Amino acid sequence: MLSSIAGDLGSILSEIFLSIVSFLILILDPFLSKEKKRIVPYIALSGLAISFFILFFQKKGESFFFEALTLDNFSLFFKSIFLISSVIAILFSIRFLNDEKFQLSEYYFFILLCTVGMMFMASSIDLISIFISYELMAISSYVLSGYLKKDLRSNEAGLKYFILGTLSTGIFLFGLSFVFGLSGNTSLKAISTNLVVLGKNPYLIFTMLIVSSALFFKIAAVPFHMWTPDVYEGAPTPVTLFISTGPKAASFAIFLRIFLEAFSSLSSEWRTLIAWVSFFTMTYGNFAALTQKSLKRMLAYSSIAHAGYILIGFAAGGDFGEPGILFYLLAYLFMNSAAFGLILFLKKGDKWGEDVDDFNGLAKNSLLFSFAIVIILMSLVGIPPTGGFFGKYFIFSSAIKEGLVWLAVAGVLNSAISLFYYFRIGQAVFMKEPSEEVKFSPSPSLSIALGIAVLAILILGIFPQPFAVLSKSSTLLP
């Protein structure tokens, strides 16, 4: 019995260590002076780095803790994404929180706690463990969105996210209760076996629609995207770049788990549903982004469009579909984090450069920074040699290979539409005169974070093969 428990604990050592570090930050906080609290983000970064190292020495296996968790290549891939996204978010946060004079230890506690929740989400193979880890991630995200107590926009973002997120959680739980009622089990493997007997039962199709609705909310897919622009704009910028990458990837992870493992008998039905949701999501996201002057709102609608692109791979499936999703999420982590992070380099009085016009004439202040902007924009559009190009190549190829040519064409046309609003940023940087109100103000942590992201985008674009192989080996399907 003891050896079994020790073996189970060995499968979650990374999560245990990160949880200890997060609570250690809270315990140390009362004993640290204001000056010494500056070490807290570096403690968090060290904890994430060590947790990442431990990740690859854990005991792998099909199931642990009474078949509630697993440790396979799929979960390891996503856990790596979550840890990297948290590192980048913290690097972007240090300067921001210092300038806002709100450098509190609980911020880093909630970043780490959210990461632990996401890591458990990737490993969960039972409805109960999925829901608990989902809520751990969600509650931490709500708190982080409203973190700046004196900022009305942040308060509004946190409240909207909490109210709508709680509603989606209720819908999700409602759907899971139907799954349990129809299958008589909470294990995804057992659910899949039991649901096959029901065939195309209308109650089962209704259940699938309920669960998918809640997950569409989490990934910001149309028509459940309504929270995204307001929350992304109002939340602190480092929080925005964090929740737009890590939690979104975690939501895709459980989306894949539940639908590929539990709802496999309804594959043709949910793939058709997702294909149409994908089309409307990327189309709406791109057209809405065209009219935005705020960079944060533009990128919020852009992130909706990217969710639509990723869903193409989900709808297509096959040999390229799921690996394409994993590769795209990896590239998306770096390009979206870097895109939102650009805002933190610009100061406009006591505010941040959140408008597209604030980027006017930046090429005259820093050619290196302008080069980074070009790489990020190329990746978001899907132009080689960047990770975004190969992400879209794999996704669109999967659609063509599986007969969804119309969806692949829609994806290509939407990518062309996105070029128009991304070009506005490039036009502002290179073709307009700089504003005296806006100051280019880099810092070491910001430069390191942006450098990591841009370098990763280029590596994924120039040497995609190893990462494509890694994505292929990390899929759920054999």
Image: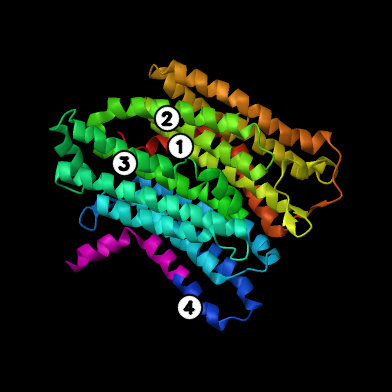
Label 3 vs label 2: CA separation? Answer: 14 Å
Residue pointed to by mark 2: 277
Of callouts 3 and 2, which one flags the residue occurring earlier in the amino acid sequence? 3
Residue at figure coordinates x 52%, y 44% from the top left: 228
* Corner quadrant of residue 368: top right
Q: Is 112 in front, or is 433?
A: 433
For residue 327, side relative to residue 476 (left or right): right
Of callouts 2 and 4, which one flags the residue occurring earlier in the amino acid sequence? 4
Q: Amino acid at mark 4?
A: Ile
Magenta stretch encompasses residue 135: no
Label 3 vs label 4: CA separation? Answer: 38 Å
Residue pointed to by mark 3: 211
Contact between labelled residues 2 and 1, with CB atoms less than 8 Å apart: yes
The residue segment tinted magenta is 1-22
Q: Amino acid at mark 1?
A: Ala
Q: What x and y, as percent, mark residue 454? A: 64, 43
Residue pointed to by mark 1: 221
For residue 230, side relative to residue 263 (left or right): right
State the SS at label 4.
helix
For residue 425, side relative to residue 303 (left or right): right
Of callouts 1 and 2, which one flags the residue occurring earlier in the amino acid sequence? 1
